[in-house]
Image (cartoon, rainbow, N blue to C red):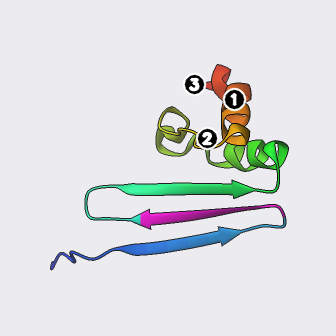
């Protein structure tokens, strides 16, 4: 099988949240965006248990920090 040294992106969107996955050869970066902290929390709960995703997420906004703080007990 031939390996591709290329990047790919996948996008998923709902009414109040969206996810962009930027897939590189050795890692994938997930960007989760939402209308507010509550919507962000709902989106994060959906992906939280996928491949230990909850242990790998970090915030880059105050809304992200608030949403992750509420979900932290699940870690």
On residue 48, the disc is 2
The secondary element bearing badge 1 is classed as helix
- Which residue occupies 74% across, 27% down? 70
SS assignment at label 2 = loop
> Residue 19: percent from the left, percent from the top?
62, 62
- The rendered magenta stretch, by its main secondary structure, is classed as strand
Secondary element under disc 3, as helix, strand or loop, is loop
Q: Which residue range is magenta in the image?
A: 16-22
Q: Is residue 60 magenta?
A: no
C-beta proximity under 8 Å, tags 2 and 1: yes
Q: Earlier in the sequence, mark 3 or mark 2?
A: 2
Residue at the spot x=69%, y=26% of the render? 69
Q: Earlier in the sequence, mark 2 or mark 1?
A: 2
Q: Which residue is mark 1?
A: 71
Which residue appears at 53% of the width and 40% of the height?
A: 57
Which label sits in the foreground, 2 or 1?
1
Residue 37 position (above or below residue 74): below
The residue that mark 3 highlights is 75
Which picture quadrant has residue 7? bottom left
> In this rendering, would 35 be left or right of 51?
right
């Amino acid at each position: 099988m031939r390996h591709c040294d290329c990047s790919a992106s996948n996008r998923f969107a709902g009414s109040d949240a969206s996810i962009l996955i930027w897939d590189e050869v050795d890692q994938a970066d997930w960007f989760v965006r939402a209308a507010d902290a509550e919507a962000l929390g709902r989106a994060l709960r959906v992906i939280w248990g996928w491949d230990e995703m909850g242990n790998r997420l970090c915030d880059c906004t105050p809304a992200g920090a608030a949403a992750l703080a509420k979900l932290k007990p699940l870690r």
